[in-house]
């Protein structure tokens, strides 16, 4: 019989425990597929965040370490400098990367560290119950902005990828999404390219992936996808923001 589906070798044979409709499982699978394709599984070290993806080491079938909230770029810097032949990626949520870890990511990018970041933006602090994140969009209701985020008191949604694209040390910055087959394919292409840039020693690469959080957004999985397309993508447009070596 022709085999039409196979679990990537980069994923362990265990079920995901994410909420129904969560974006993290798509992103895990895509990363695992790209690592299989590039045949680098034995060389990869992933860095799991504090956040809903904290148990990445339970799912990925390669080396993964867990570090303190917002600190994956510091750990990635150390690992890559000590073991330059290993492929290092950090996996971070918007609370991890764009709130408590803002200084870490900016300075790692500015140093042009040769590692890859997978940044899952779900516009909220998922793990702790749906508080406002820097990427929460204006008007979005969260547990800490029950009447919707207001610019006057909470400022504007932070576009981290645009910010990082202005930094000289970055080589590849792209924003993708997991809302459709087309965008899953685009995510896969961007993840692969970011890893290839690291393999080729081209410096800091980051893929921001918009992901739904139906549980904390208080929506069904379908409503969450619609909201992402209509509201989130208007604030966080998809595309390649920077490709230093692209044609
Ligand atoms: C030093 C520290 N501060 C705060 C927390 C509480 N905390 C755990 S996860 C989290 C936010 C996670 O949000 P995000 O990074 O967006 O990831 P998600 O859960 O949405 O995937 C916070 C504030 C913590 N664990 N450690």
Image (tube, helix red, strand yellow):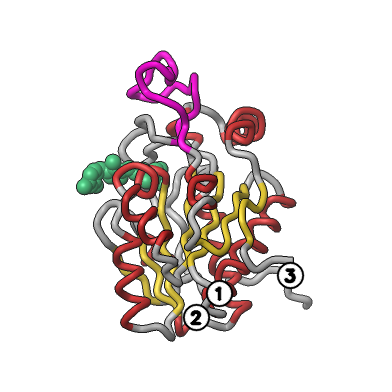
Q: Do the residues labelled 1 and 2 touch (CB within 8 Å)?
A: yes
Q: Is there a contact, CB below 8 Å, between mark 3 and mark 1?
A: no
Q: In this view, does 153 lie above or below 242?
A: above
State the CA–CA distance, disc 3 to disc 1. Answer: 19 Å
Residue visible at 47% across and 27% down? 218
Q: Quadrant of ligand 1?
A: top left
Q: Distance between the residues labelled 2 and 3?
A: 22 Å
Q: Name the residue under label 3.
A: 4
Most extreme residue toward the top, as rendered? Answer: 147
Alpha carbons under labels 1 and 2: distance apart = 6 Å
39 is higher (above) or lower (below) than 224:
below
Residue 95 on image: x %, y %: 36, 43
Q: What is the number of the mark on residue 109?
A: none
Which residue is at a point 63% across and 57% down the rendered structure image? Answer: 187
Among numbered discs 2 and 3, the one appearing first in the sequence? 3
- In the image, is residue 225 above or below residue 204? above
Q: Is the magenta stretch mostly helix, strand or loop?
A: loop
Quarter of the view holding residue 236: top right
Residue at the spot of label 2: 41
Magenta residue span? 135-158
Q: Residue furthest front?
A: 168
Residue 35: x and y, percent?
A: 55, 74
Identify which residue is drawn at 32% across, 55% down: 104
Locate residue 130 relative to residue 162 in the image: left or right: left
Say whether residue 223 is visible. Answer: no
The quadrant of the picture occupied by the C terminus is bottom right
* Residue ID for mark 1: 35
Q: In what element is the residue under mark 3?
A: loop
Q: Nearer the viewer, mark 2 or mark 3?
A: 2
| Left or right for 138, reference 225 | left
- The answer to which of 84 and 34 lies nearer the viewer is 84
């Amino acid at each position: 019989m022709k085999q039409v589906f196979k679990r990537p070798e980069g994923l362990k044979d265990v079920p995901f425990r994410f909420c129904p409709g969560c974006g993290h499982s798509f992103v895990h699978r895509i990363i695992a597929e790209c690592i299989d394709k590039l045949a680098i599984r034995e060389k990869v070290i992933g860095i799991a965040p504090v956040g809903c993806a904290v148990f990445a080491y339970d799912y990925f079938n390669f080396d993964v370490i867990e570090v303190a909230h917002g600190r994956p770029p510091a750990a990635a810097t150390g690992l890559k400098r000590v073991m330059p032949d290993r492929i290092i990626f950090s996996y971070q949520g918007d609370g991890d990367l764009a709130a408590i870890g803002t200084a870490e990511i900016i300075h790692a990018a500015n140093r042009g560290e040769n590692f890859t970041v997978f940044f899952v933006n779900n516009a909220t602090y998922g793990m702790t119950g749906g508080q406002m994140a820097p990427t929460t969009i204006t008007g979005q209701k969260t547990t800490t902005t029950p009447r919707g985020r207001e610019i006057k008191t909470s400022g504007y949604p932070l576009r981290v990828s645009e910010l990082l694209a202005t930094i000289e040390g970055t080589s590849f910055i792209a924003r993708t999404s997991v809302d459709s087959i087309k965008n899953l394919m685009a995510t896969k292409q961007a993840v692969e390219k970011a890893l290839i840039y690291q393999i080729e020693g081209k410096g800091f690469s980051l893929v921001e992936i918009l992901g739904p959080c139906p549980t904390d957004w208080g929506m069904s999985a379908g409503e969450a996808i619609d909201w992402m397309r209509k509201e989130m993508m208007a604030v966080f447009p998809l595309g390649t923001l920077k490709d230093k070596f692209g044609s």
